Amino acid sequence: MKDTLVNVENLTRIFDVSKPWLNRVIEREEKKLLLAVNGVSLEIRRGETFALVGESGSGKSTIAKMIVGLLSASQGKIDFDGIDLFQPGGAEMRALRQRYQMIFQDPFASLNPRWRVNKIIAEPLRKFDMESSESARHKRVEELLELVGMSAKDGVKFPHEFSGGQRQRIAIARALSSNPEFIVCDEPTSALDVSVQAQILNLMRDLQDELGLTYLFISHDLSVVRHMANRIGVLYLGRLVEVADGKELFRNPRHPYTKMLLNAIPDLDMTGREVARPDGEIPNPINPPSGCTFHPRCPIATEYCKREIPSARNSEAGSVACFEATGD
Amino acid sequence: MSDTLLGVKDLVVEFSTRRGILTAVDKVSFDLERGEVLGLVGESGAGKSITGSAIVGLIDPPGRIAAGTVHLAGQRIDNLPSEKMRRIRGDKIGMVFQDPLTSLNPLYTVAKQLVQTILTHKDISKKQARDRAIELLDKVGIPAADLRIDDYPHQFSGGMRQRVVIALALCADPELIIADEPTTALDVSVQSQIVGVLKKMCSEHGASVILITHDMGVIAEAADRVAVLYSGRMAEIGPVRDVIKHPQHPYTKGLMGSIPTITQEGDRLTQIPGSMPRLTDRPPGCAFAPRCEMAMDVCRQNHPEEKDVGTARVACHLMRKEGAVA
């Protein structure tokens, strides 16, 4: 398809969490493997915001890191604009890297405390040899600072002189400096206060409209996702259980896990909607349940669900990985 | 006796630093009735946790309570010597902290921690204390409590650990529970379970709760009344429903507008420009004035008094003006 920017197929990541070799031999233990991401396939279309939601340990951040190349995949394939990300090396890869960037969760950890903001934002420019002269780079940094709603004079300061929200703006400016088409945002607002979160979310939407960006937006907060995303993928224990259009997912959730998550959202409009308390917790991913990993918490699970792993069924509204889920 | 359990009046908490004295909590007053759940909300640095710590007397130097009083069931507790205060903590006031892993001792089993706490406050035998601990764990929703009681904290998941902490806080049947961000470290699905447990336990034990959080969703679900703090001062206090649906203070209005909700249509969130001032450079007058769209001259000069507006109490000059004109 023409409008697909990122295509992920059967992406899998296994972490080896075994004890050291000698301990294993002495204690006669097997290797322990953690299947953090298990056969995830998704496509992100140009210009949209695709959101991944899930609880901790569901593999959201692992997927993000694999897409930007911070982690290697154990299996699977990622295409960026038709080019296989695991194939090329050297110069071709460098050219490709310019086109996607990442914004991290914690703006206190993602900015080098010893560098001035100017240097932080200009780093991608230097690495990718994008502006020829120092003065051109400087000018570009000033533009970027103003683009994210800061003053050009802020460039000479150090990160510790800024509040969390301002730091996240700096991180966004850095991500934008190489003119990327695609930005992976890993919980960009979860370290921020609500009033600041609103500023950053609005800024991200404005930038998307202005620069035609495509976002992969990762969050555990369904209300934020509802606000930001065109399409939403719900993860549970490393598997994508449902993908649907943003509005459709909230109006007509099909997977029982999605339903459970939606029911647990606090009722801020005070409509008197009954907030249902979900049962159980995410199981240990080292020993996931057999069959559909959600079956111990699922209200409609059958014997069949305990044995067989459901694969994603595609329909017009999206895809859902559940035997029992009704179509519409 | 009235039904008031806790009375906090003009509480001021100061920290002396090299750059002068910082007023982290500035003349905060509120009452808490028996059996009531009061939410304390605010952004980071608004003074919500400090207020909670001040009530239980856990402010460490260089911080100190500089003025104001705290009364618990008619007894003044803010000026008690530390030994006496120690008896009140745990006995009359229980605390639940944000991170369940750091509030449990990793070297002791859950049984040991619970039994020890119960024995400190109650005059019963070890066997009875253990039975009571199992009963408490069972009540907070830990499956197979009689088997799991001998586990160590690391053998529990995050949500289960927080349940243990709640059980620990309830050991001595306290009259007041202060829960400081009890759900912040937890996943969404577990978060709503914990709010449920907290609510249920408190109504069963008849305890009052101060629920400190930055999450309006948790407040909406659990609290009866809510107090909104901004830069160490009370901005608005009132019944949850009224404050959420019809906020009066411009800050509360902005705060409510900036929370994305699932029913909301439209593209942009209301945003409050800027961020909360640092305590070192809090402006004279109303602390919110620099970010407030409706700020008048008087707002920049004088700190507003708290005024009764309907069911709520609001600290804003706009309120006085409207009231005076009408």
Image (cartoon, coloured by chain):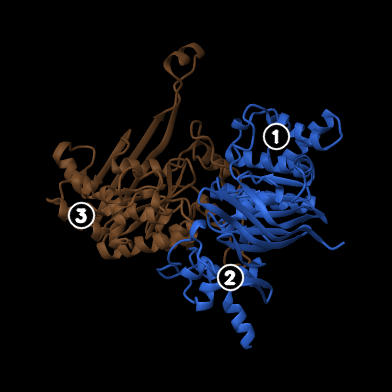
Q: Does residue B147 appear left or right of residue A49 in this picture?
A: right
| Residue bearing mark 3 | A138
Q: Amino acid at mark 1?
A: Ala
Instruction: Name the residue tied to disc 1.
Output: B144
* A1 or B259: nearer the viewer: B259
Residue A152, image x and y in percent?
A: 28, 60
Residue occupying image coordinates x 71% and y 32%:
B113
> Regarding mark 1 in the picture, which secondary structure is present there?
loop
> Which residue is more in the foreground, A215 or B53?
B53
Helix, strand or loop at label 3? It is helix
Which of discs 1 and 2 lies nearer the camera? The answer is 2
Residue linked to disc 2: B303
Label 3, label 2: how far apart the Cα atoms are: 43 Å
Q: Colour of chain B?
A: blue
Mark 2 or mark 1, which is nearer the start of the sequence?
1
* Residue A299 visible in rendering: no
Q: Nearer the viewer, residue B295 or B310?
A: B295
Calculate the distance from the C-alpha at mark 3 to the C-alpha at mark 1: 64 Å
Q: Residues within 10 Å of mark 2 (few under 14, many from 20)?
A: some
User: Where does the N terminus of chain A fall, quadrant-wise?
Assistant: bottom left
Residue A41 in the image: x percent, y percent? 34, 45
**What residue appears at the point 44 percent right and 51 percent down from the top-left corner?**
A219
